[in-house]
Image (cartoon, grey):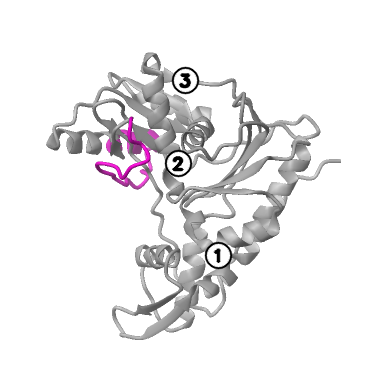
């Protein structure tokens, strides 16, 4: 995302999306940086800094090692998310907030103190994800006699965030199928119920009830998902109209506020700690996520938001794709 540090809440100058490469997340990050630098040059924007938000230390280390002469700031993603929520006035003054980040590759839960910005606990699951929602919607369309590729399926899923009814046409046969927001809600209901249990388990582990829950990630654009979570969890909900860009916009603010942190290193802006379970065992750290935000500050700020673009196989046997539901770890 190419934007100005004093206007992170406004529509950006430019955006790009780079599919994750097999060589590692760092290659994708620097490809996004290259594209946004090119865009900035065309617009005579002077880039004075770059910031990268990461969700784990191994991701940050890979980017730091590959950075070379690139001067960048590495920012822990929950801190960036918290900073933008504070900027918008949505962050509670006291207590903790639970960040519910449902993106293309998985669900990340982070409970973080609003005042000290210390992480109380964090959990990651790749079972519930936007790509799984894409596969379920594609299966529903196939049952209706319409076959479209995954990119088109993702587009229709995103349209259901604003449209209640859609007509989808098979590009080869011309067959048409009508899908509604209610149809999609039924498809993802089981997964959302599971994620609500995931949230309850985290609250039990920390012993601290969050003041509110922030809904982040592109999947939460869908109103049916937000409504279901609100019904399942007795928590005040915080929602930004562009939930997938909360991290990038928070990184813009932090990079502008802390210019001395632009050296090529993994920067911990706050005393973040790994979440721990009630039995004092470390919470497991899952696979690296596929979304990384890249920002630059002052005259021109650059943020590259990455998303995975994995293709999912066809489901033409009349049965829905298998969705594994993994419960919280058992102790004892």
Distance CA(mark 1)–CA(mark 3): 37 Å
Q: Residue 293, how many percent across, how many down?
A: 39, 37
Q: Residue at x 38, y 53 (%)?
A: 309
Asked which secondary structure carries label 1, the reply is helix
Which span of residues is magenta-colored?
A: 6-32
Task: Give the class, few, some or many, for how many residues have Cα within 10 Å of label 3's Cα (few <14, many ≥20).
Answer: some
Q: Dots 2 and 3: beta carbons under 8 Å?
A: no
Predominant SS of the magenta segment: loop
Left or right for 25, reference 107 = left
Q: Indicate whether residue 19 is drawn in magenta.
A: yes
Q: Is residue 164 magenta?
A: no
Please tell me whether mark 2 sits on a helix, a strand or a loop: helix
Q: Is residue 65 visible?
A: no
Q: Is residue 212 above or below residue 33?
A: below
Horizontal side of 226 relative to 258 (left or right) equals right
- The residue under label 1 is 224
The residue identified by callout 2 is 246
Asked if one can make out residue 311 in the rendered structure from this viewpoint, the answer is yes
Q: What is the quadrant of residue 274 in the picture? A: top right
Q: CA distance from mark 2 to mark 3?
A: 19 Å
Residue tagged by mark 3? 267
Could you say which quadrant of the image residue 251 lies in? top left
Q: Nearer the viewer, residue 217 or 87?
A: 87
């Amino acid at each position: 995302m190419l934007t100005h540090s004093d206007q992170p809440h406004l529509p950006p100058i430019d955006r790009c999306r780079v599919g994750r490469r097999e060589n590692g997340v760092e290659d994708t990050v620097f490809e996004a940086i290259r594209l946004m630098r090119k865009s900035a040059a065309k617009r005579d924007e002077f880039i004075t800094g770059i910031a990268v938000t990461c969700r784990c230390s191994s991701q940050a280390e890979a980017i730091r090692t590959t950075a070379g002469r690139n001067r960048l700031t590495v920012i822990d993603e929950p801190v960036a998310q918290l900073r933008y929520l504070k900027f918008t006035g949505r962050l509670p003054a006291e207590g903790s907030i639970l960040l519910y980040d449902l993106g293309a590759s998985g669900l990340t839960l982070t409970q973080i103190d609003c005042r000290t910005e210390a992480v109380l606990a964090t959990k990651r699951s790749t079972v519930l994800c936007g790509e799984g929602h894409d596969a379920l919607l594609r299966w529903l369309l196939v049952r209706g006699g319409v076959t479209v590729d995954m990119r088109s399926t993702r587009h229709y899923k995103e349209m259901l965030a604003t449209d209640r009814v859609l007509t989808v046409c098979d590009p080869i046969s011309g067959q048409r199928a009508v899908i509604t927001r209610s149809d999609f809600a039924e498809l993802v209901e089981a997964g959302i119920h599971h994620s609500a249990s995931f949230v309850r388990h985290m609250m039990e582990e920390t012993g601290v009830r969050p003041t509110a829950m922030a809904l982040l990630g592109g999947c939460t654009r869908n109103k049916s998902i937000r409504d279901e979570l609100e019904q399942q969890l007795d928590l005040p909900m915080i929602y930004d109209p562009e939930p997938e860009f909360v991290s990038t916009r928070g990184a813009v603010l932090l990079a502008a506020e802390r210019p001395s942190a632009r050296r090529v290193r993994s920067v911990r802006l706050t005393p973040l700690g790994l979440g721990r379970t009630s039995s004092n065992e470390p919470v497991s750290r899952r696979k690296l996520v596929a979304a990384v935000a890249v920002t630059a500050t002052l005259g021109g700020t650059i943020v590259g938001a990455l998303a995975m673009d994995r293709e999912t196989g066809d489901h033409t046997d009349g049965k829905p794709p298998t969705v594994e539901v993994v419960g919280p770890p058992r102790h004892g």
